[in-house]
Amino acid sequence: MIQILGISGSIRKASTNTKMLHTVAALGKGRINMPVFCALDTLPPYNPDLDLSGRPLHDSVVRFRQTCEQAQAVLFACPEYGHGIPGVLKNALDWLVSSGEINQKPVAVTNAYSNRARGWSGLESLIRTLRAMDSTITGCNTPEQALSEANLVQNQVRALIAAVQTSPA
């Protein structure tokens, strides 16, 4: 079974992005295993001195890195804050930059806005960060796609699955 990790860029309890990821996981049951990581707020602020010190890292960082390492692909649902990526998500990605758990992994990015043209600045910011991390972006809802594709998230998950199935082991 394909292992896709869902990561929401929101820490709100009533986050529509988190709800969307849980819905995708439930609808994919039996075809994909998709845990949703909901603990971005437990990660300490990224500090390269801590990361490279050789000392044990905070338990939440270790768990997050292990969870990302075990995934074959990642689906991000990212709201937009101040025309960019939410700070908690950027912090989480910073913890992965030097360790590489999602480097060269298939990733897709989306958001739960009903008007998908909204939130595009946040997705662009996320895509720039993921490209810098050498992730393989298989799907993203551009404003043009959002207006023309009714099954956008479904198509992104299909693209993730196809990328995992065709990538070398």
Image: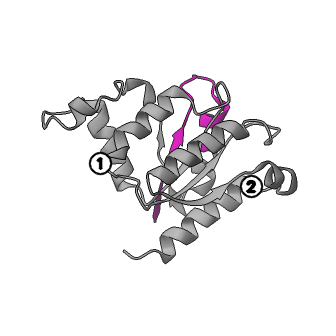
Q: Nearer the viewer, residue 80 or 112?
A: 80
Crowd rating for badge 1 (residues with CA inside 10 Å; few <14, some 14–19, many 20+) = few
Crowd rating for badge 2 (residues with CA inside 10 Å; few <14, some 14–19, many 20+) = some
Task: Find residue 137 and report its horizontal and vertical position in percent.
Answer: 56, 59
Horizontal side, residue 51 vs residue 86: left or right: left
Horizontal side, residue 83 vs residue 58: left or right: right
Residue at 75% from the left image edge and 51% from the top image edge: 142
SS of the residue under disc 2: helix
Q: Which residues are magenta?
A: 1-21
Q: Are marks 1 and 2 in contact (CB under 8 Å)?
A: no
Horizontal side, residue 122 vs residue 143: left or right: left
Q: Which residue is mark 1?
A: 99
In this orientation, does residue 20 appear?
A: no
Q: Which residue is mark 2?
A: 152
Task: Find residue 72 and report its horizontal and vertical position in percent.
Answer: 43, 60
Considering only order in the chain, which callout, 2 or 1, is on the residue closer to the N terminus? 1
User: Within the image, what quadrant is residue 159 found in?
Assistant: bottom right
SS of the residue under disc 1: loop
Residue at 59% from the left image edge and 56% from the top image edge: 28
Q: Amino acid at mark 1?
A: Ser
Task: Find residue 12 and report its horizontal and vertical position in percent.
Answer: 58, 22
- Residue at the far left in the pictured view: 55
Q: Is residue 7 magenta?
A: yes
Task: Find residue 103 and report its horizontal and vertical position in percent.
Answer: 40, 57
